[in-house]
Image: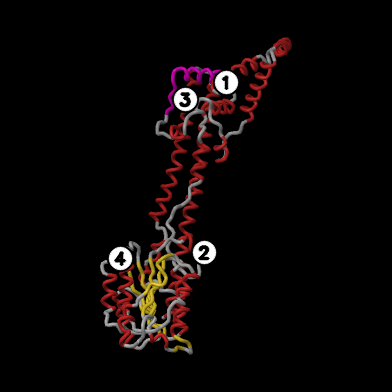
């Protein structure tokens, strides 16, 4: 490609120099005779060279990022790779042969034309960067990488659920002791609890792996069945992703029958969680106190001991004051929350609205949004893509200046032409740097818009959580 470029420009210079305005008509006839005597291959080459001259004259200067990407590599740097061109060295070096060939090309170029704009386009043809397209498209593909905030809410779409980061493990402990057979609002407590737990499973299953454990559903309330009932604690939905059909089916596999091994149920959750590295949240739905001689307060304390990513939360369903006092003690010991649901509607509402974040959590919720340092880090990450392009522009500009130095040293053009060529080089360099500055402004705006969108999401979520907390007070 390089040799062909030299030969093509040489033939052009010879052919065009014969067309001087000072030549007589005989010279024109002599030229026609030369073309007539030439073989078909030579004529094709002359025509081909003429088209390249026309391209130089008609070629457009860079005025957009797309135009930068469309630039073809100069014949002397066509094989220069992207990484090589982005190196810190600001001076391009050539071997002796290449220097001679480059000087020959520049001499031919300046003999062909004294127009600064055309000479500049010729320098681009010889020394222009071949790598703008690859580098700019890589930078254009940059996207902000802020961590998505964890903002759990009920009623998400399947797509939202699939893209939501997992928050950990959730274990629902459901009291199925005989007291759950008592009526509330003309319904059986157990039936109301199953319906509410089904909805609750769907809510927390959007953000966590989930398990359902039942206790009090073995034996009976008779003394001879106490051991069976107190030890009959069963995981009926194995820990895993929420599956609506399977979860609903698990709720049909038991009935209320016996004692209330609350401490044993929490111990079961502790045993299940032994090897979990994620956070673990226990949710208990109960209507009474421990009746199997255990100490649920102590077990809850043991469950969260030395682990601030675990908690025990309780809904007391239609309980008396004694039961409520104990259940509150259990939730306090387990670093959790206690909620009272005195009737069927309150149980459904409390569970459907899920365990809401604490006032402290809401006070610090703004930390879920990107702060100034994280935004600045994204600026810097984009600059890692942009700065090498600016280095390419600088190195390309230095090549043009080296060529200009050759032109001046060899006195290949008049001083005013050299000055205009220098101006053209400087102007195009400024245009390209301005394009990159505009490009950076676009990406900075994109980064800021994404950070603001996340901040707006966090603010909206915080306000909604506060509203739900006020509604439940």
The quadrant of the rendering that contains the C terminus is bottom left
Q: Which residue is mark 4?
A: 274
Q: Mark 3 or mark 1, which is nearer the start of the sequence?
A: 1
Instruction: Determine if the magenta segment contains residue 100.
Output: yes
Select label 3 or label 2 by which is in front.
2
Q: Nearer the viewer, residue 326 or 274?
A: 274
Q: Rounded to the nearest whole Å, what is the CA distance between mark 1 and mark 3?
A: 23 Å
Q: Is residue 353 above or below residue 408?
A: below
Q: Rounded to the nearest whole Å, what is the CA distance between mark 4 and mark 2?
A: 30 Å
Q: Nearer the viewer, residue 151 or 242?
A: 242
Occupied quadrant, residue 28: top right
Decide if residue 306 is in sight here.
yes
Q: Position of residue 412 (x, y in %)?
A: 53, 18
Mark 4, other Cα within 10 Å: few <14 / some 14–19 / many ≥20: few
Select label 1 or label 4 by which is in front.
4
Q: Position of residue 314 (x, y in %)?
A: 36, 78
Mark 1, other Cα within 10 Å: few <14 / some 14–19 / many ≥20: few
Is mark 1 in CB contact (under 8 Å) with mark 3?
no
Q: Mark 4 or mark 1, which is nearer the start of the sequence?
A: 1
Q: Which residue is mark 1?
A: 4
Q: Nearer the viewer, residue 469 or 374?
A: 469
Q: Which residue is mark 3?
A: 402
Q: Mark 2 or mark 3, which is nearer the start of the sequence?
A: 2
Instruction: Determine if the magenta segment contains residue 390.
Output: no
Q: Mark 4 or mark 3, which is nearer the start of the sequence?
A: 4
Q: Which residue is mark 2?
A: 158
- Per the rendered image, the range of residues in magenta is 91-113
Classify mark 2: helix, strand or loop. Answer: helix
Q: Rounded to the nearest whole Å, what is the CA distance between mark 3 and mark 4?
A: 71 Å
């Amino acid at each position: 490609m390089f040799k062909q470029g030299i030969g093509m420009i040489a033939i052009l210079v010879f052919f065009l120099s014969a067309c001087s305005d000072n030549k007589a008509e005989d010279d024109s006839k002599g030229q026609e005779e030369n073309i007539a005597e030439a073989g078909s291959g030579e004529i094709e080459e002359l025509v081909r060279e003429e088209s390249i001259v026309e391209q130089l004259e008609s070629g457009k200067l860079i005025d957009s990022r797309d135009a930068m990407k469309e630039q073809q590599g100069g014949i002397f740097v066509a094989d220069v790779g992207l990484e090589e061109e982005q190196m810190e060295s600001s001076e391009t070096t050539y071997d002796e042969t290449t220097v001679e060939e480059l000087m020959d090309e520049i001499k031919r170029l300046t003999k062909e034309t004294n127009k600064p704009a055309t000479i500049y386009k010729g320098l681009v043809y010889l020394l222009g960067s071949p790598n703008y397209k690859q580098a700019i498209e890589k930078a254009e593909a940059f996207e902000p990488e802020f961590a998505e905030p964890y903002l759990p809410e009920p009623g998400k779409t399947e797509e939202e659920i699939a893209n939501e980061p997992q928050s950990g493990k959730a274990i629902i402990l459901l009291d199925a002791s005989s007291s759950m057979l008592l009526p509330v609002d003309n319904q059986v407590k157990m039936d109301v609890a199953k319906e509410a737990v089904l909805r609750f499973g769907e809510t927390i299953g959007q953000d966590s792996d989930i398990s359902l454990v039942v206790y009090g559903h073995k034996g009976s309330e008779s003394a001879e069945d106490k051991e069976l009932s107190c030890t009959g604690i069963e995981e009926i939905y194995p820990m895993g992703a929420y599956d609506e059909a399977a979860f609903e089916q698990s709720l049909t596999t038991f009935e209320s029958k016996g004692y209330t091994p609350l401490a044993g149920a929490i111990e079961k959750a502790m045993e299940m969680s032994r090897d979990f590295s994620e956070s673990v949240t226990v949710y208990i739905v109960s209507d009474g106190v421990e009746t199997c001689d255990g100490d649920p307060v102590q077990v809850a304390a043991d469950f969260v001991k030395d682990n601030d990513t675990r908690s025990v939360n309780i809904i007391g369903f239609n309980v008396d004051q004694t039961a409520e006092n104990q259940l509150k003690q259990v939730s306090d010991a387990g670093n959790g929350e206690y909620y009272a649901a005195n009737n069927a509607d309150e149980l459904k509402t409390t569970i459907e609205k899920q365990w809401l974040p604490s006032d402290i959590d809401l006070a610090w919720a703004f930390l879920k949004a990107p702060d100034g340092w994280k935004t600045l880090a994204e600026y810097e990450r984009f600059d890692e893509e942009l700065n090498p392009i600016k280095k390419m522009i600088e190195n390309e500009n230095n090549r043009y200046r080296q060529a200009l130095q050759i032109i001046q040293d060899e006195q290949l053009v008049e001083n005013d032409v050299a000055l205009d060529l220098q101006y053209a080089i400087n102007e195009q360099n400024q245009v390209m740097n301005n394009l990159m500055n505009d490009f950076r402004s676009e990406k900075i705006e994109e980064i800021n818009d994404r950070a603001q969108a996340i901040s707006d999401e966090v603010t909206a979520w915080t306000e909604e959580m506060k509203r739900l907390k006020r509604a439940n007070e």
